[in-house]
Image (cartoon, coloured by chain):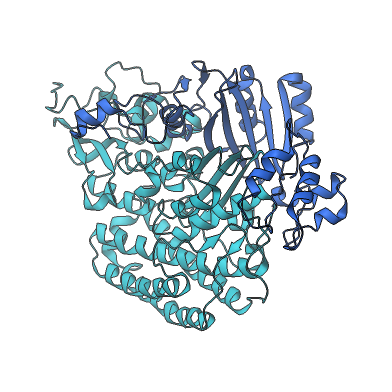
Chain colours: A blue, B cyan
């Protein structure tokens, strides 16, 4: 409940995207959802209002909306991550300084922490802040970045009824400490991250593939792994399919 | 003591939890048997604790001269509810440890999501937990709505709640029928399947499909209710309430049922939390936590209902919790069907769904536990990353803790009581 009520921009049921109003867009364009309005003009306004606007903001919006009916202007100018303040955040900011950043997006709070803080900070969250339930551990691959992987821990505290995410970045080939000793549930969750992304967790009791077969080569959820790609050799040997597909 | 090797030595018989020394805050009681003989290195910190609990199993007094046996259960086993393979390490009939081998149904749903638009991916989620497809759809649609910062209109929320609760009933009915069948009671299966049909008929009339319904769309519902929808649901409520009593007369006081389920597969609240177990399994251990109450979504905050909990965390309590949950679902349904407001069923959502770059996690209380969707958007029409947090997958992890020291026959009971769907475990 805390999470929902903290939402910075509660949206009315009509679905009108309010935050654009904050971004100094004239009210006329906020109401531009009616089908009769021409698309072009609306879109340039929106794109200009987009917070982190790319080089040519008008272009991508226009091409995407082109095949659609005029009634469907996309509204990319959504809410932006805001700093998240709370007594807990203040405490850890004082302790860790620049290694830790706390933000909130669409009412959901998250920490972005430096890789070096990882096992300690997670343990503190469990021991000091009662985040006793590790909901999920997952990763995201950003191949163009220097540190290619975002690792996420989604945590929940029964006592506080609060959910929080912890995010850190690591490079390809780097390892990260396992959190199995903090939450037993991390066992399979880390195995799945390893299986799908090839991220090694130090200190995991039995890190091996979980969903893919043991001898499989490649890590399917990496961005450079194609959707039709298979481990042809494995398929040929184990399934007897000549083509490998 | 002669350590005879079992013929099947190449089977991966390393039972991981043995060497873990009670990780992640697991309490001692959970490790009822700490197989000293399983761990040749002898580096086992909790030997004393385990010996106190099971005084037979000390190195000086091997309590049986039988050979340890590694046997394979599944993947083609009727009681595993799909293609689950469990490697059991047995001493006689006693389970010393288990290892689950999963992934036989892996279809790469998360990879598929990255290659489909938000709208195109919607039907895929139904294929994960295919006995509760409506819940899957609700979770996904709401997660994308959250990312878009839109909310479904009130009428859509009512329709969503009605269908989701009906689906919860259908899911629990299927659980009850198969669980009882696994344990040896055949009758409930016929009763529950007979009555589940009535729910599937409502689904079919509403959206044309019985199982993989694809009932909801991002922003609301595609279909308006058909003429007579309310009447059908009300009739079903009248029809179904006595049916729950009927199931209970078959099982609740049945001596065989009680013998087979009481004190079987016990998991303490602390262990359940450490292992991330959610849903009825967690509540049967005494943790009063239901996302519908804790972090209400759709319009669950409008309804008056209770969260049934158990005390002992055994299979019997989980049975009772789910039975009571069915009655609570009826209460929600009654309030919802009598309160459906008029109005639109679809929020204003752009035809091309293109959320702003960002990430959200949204979860709902699916019949099996916390079903979460974590979506990362890069501002394009396709999810950059979509992660499903499946309740079955995480709950299945608790199997090992729950069956250690129990009998082989109890493994079947515990798999049934965990209520897993392999389509969701493997995705």
Front residue (pair B91, B72)? B72
Front residue (pair A124, B355)? B355
Judge left or right: residue B192 versus residue A170.
left
Q: In the picture shown, does residue B248 fall above or below A221?
A: below
Front residue (pair B96, A79)? A79
Q: Quadrant of the C terminus of chain B?
A: top left
Q: How many marks?
A: 0
Residue at 41 percent of width and 60 percent of height: B212
Judge left or right: residue B162 versus residue A57.
left
Residue A59 is situated, as x and y percent measured from the top left of the image, at 70, 39
Q: Is residue A6 visible?
A: no
Q: Name the image quarter holding residue A156.
A: top right
Q: Quadrant of the N terminus of chain B?
A: top left
Q: In the picture shown, does residue B349 fall above or below B278?
A: below
Q: Name the image quarter holding residue B179.
A: bottom left
Front residue (pair B312, B213)? B213
Residue at 26 percent of width and 41 percent of height: B85
Q: Is residue B96 visible?
A: yes
Judge left or right: residue B168 versus residue B38.
right
Residue A236 is situated, as x and y percent measured from the top left of the image, at 21, 29
Q: Name the image quarter holding residue B19.
A: top left
Residue B125 is situated, as x and y percent measured from the top left of the image, at 46, 52
Residue B298 is situated, as x and y percent measured from the top left of the image, at 62, 61
């Amino acid at each position: 409940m805390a999470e929902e009520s903290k939402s910075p921009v509660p949206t009315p049921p009509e679905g009108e995207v309010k935050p654009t109003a904050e971004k100094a867009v004239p009210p006329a364009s906020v109401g531009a959802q009616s089908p009769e309005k021409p698309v072009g003009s609306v879109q340039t306004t929106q794109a200009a209002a987009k917070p982190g606007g790319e080089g040519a903001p008008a272009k991508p919006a226009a091409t995407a909306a082109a095949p659609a009916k005029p009634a469907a202007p996309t509204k990319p100018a959504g809410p932006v991550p805001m700093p998240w303040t709370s007594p807990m955040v203040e405490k850890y900011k004082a302790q860790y300084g620049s290694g830790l950043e706390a933000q909130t997006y669409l009412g959901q709070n998250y920490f972005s922490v430096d890789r070096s803080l990882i096992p300690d900070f997670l343990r503190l969250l469990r021991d000091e802040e009662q985040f006793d339930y590790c909901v999920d551990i997952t990763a995201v691959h950003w191949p163009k970045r220097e540190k290619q992987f975002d690792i996420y821990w989604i945590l929940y505290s029964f006592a506080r009824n609060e959910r929080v995410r912890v995010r850190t970045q690591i490079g390809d080939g780097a390892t990260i400490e396992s959190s199995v000793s903090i939450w037993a549930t991390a066992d399979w969750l880390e195995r799945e991250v390893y299986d799908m992304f090839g991220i090694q967790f130090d200190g995991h009791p039995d890190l091996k593939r979980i969903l893919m077969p043991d001898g499989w080569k490649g890590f399917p959820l990496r961005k450079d792994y194609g959707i039709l790609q298979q481990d042809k050799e494995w398929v040929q040997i184990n399934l007897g399919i000549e083509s490998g597909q | 003591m002669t350590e005879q090797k079992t013929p099947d030595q190449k089977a991966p018989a390393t039972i991981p939890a043995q060497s873990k020394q009670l990780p992640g805050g697991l309490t001692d009681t959970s490790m009822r048997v700490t197989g000293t003989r399983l761990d040749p290195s002898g580096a086992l910190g909790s030997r004393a604790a385990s010996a106190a609990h099971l005084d037979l199993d000390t190195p000086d007094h091997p309590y049986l001269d039988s050979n340890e046996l590694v046997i394979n259960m599944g993947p083609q086993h009727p009681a595993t509810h799909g293609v689950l393979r469990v490697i059991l390490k047995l001493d006689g009939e006693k389970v010393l440890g288990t290892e689950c081998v999963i992934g036989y149904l892996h279809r790469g749903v998360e990879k598929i999501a990255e290659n489909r638009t938000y709208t195109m991916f919607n039907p895929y989620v139904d294929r994960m937990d295919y006995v509760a497809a409506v819940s899957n759809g609700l979770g996904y649609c709401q997660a994308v709505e959250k990312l878009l910062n839109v909310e479904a209109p009130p009428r859509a929320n009512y329709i969503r709640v009605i269908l989701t609760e009906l689906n919860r009933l259908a899911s629990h009915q299927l659980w009850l029928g198969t669980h009882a069948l696994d344990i040896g009671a055949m009758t409930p299966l016929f009763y529950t399947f007979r009555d589940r049909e009535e729910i599937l008929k409502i689904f079919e009339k509403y959206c044309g499909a019985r199982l993989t319904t694809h009932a909801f769309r991002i922003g609301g519902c595609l279909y308006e209710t058909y003429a007579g929808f309310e009447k059908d649901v009300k009739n079903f409520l009248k029809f179904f309430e006595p049916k729950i009593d009927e199931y209970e007369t078959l099982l609740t006081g049945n001596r065989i049922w009680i013998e087979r389920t009481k004190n079987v597969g016990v998991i303490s609240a602390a262990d359940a939390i450490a292992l991330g177990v959610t849903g009825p399994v967690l509540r049967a251990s005494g943790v009063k936590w239901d996302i519908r109450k804790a972090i209400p979504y759709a319009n669950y905050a409008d309804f008056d209902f209770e969260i049934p909990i158990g005390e002992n965390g055994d299979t019997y309590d989980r049975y009772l919790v789910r039975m009571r949950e069915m009655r609570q679902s009826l209460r929600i349904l009654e309030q919802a069907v009598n309160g459906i407001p008029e109005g639109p069923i679809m929020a204003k959502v752009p035809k091309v769904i293109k959320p702003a770059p960002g990430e959200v996690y949204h979860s709902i209380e699916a019949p099996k536990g916390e079903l979460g969707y974590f979506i990362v958007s890069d501002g394009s029409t396709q999810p950059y990353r979509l992660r499903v947090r499946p309740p079955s997958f995480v709950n299945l992890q608790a199997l090992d803790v729950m069956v250690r020291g129990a009998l082989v026959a109890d493994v079947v009971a515990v798999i049934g009581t965990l209520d897993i769907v392999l389509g969701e475990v493997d995705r």
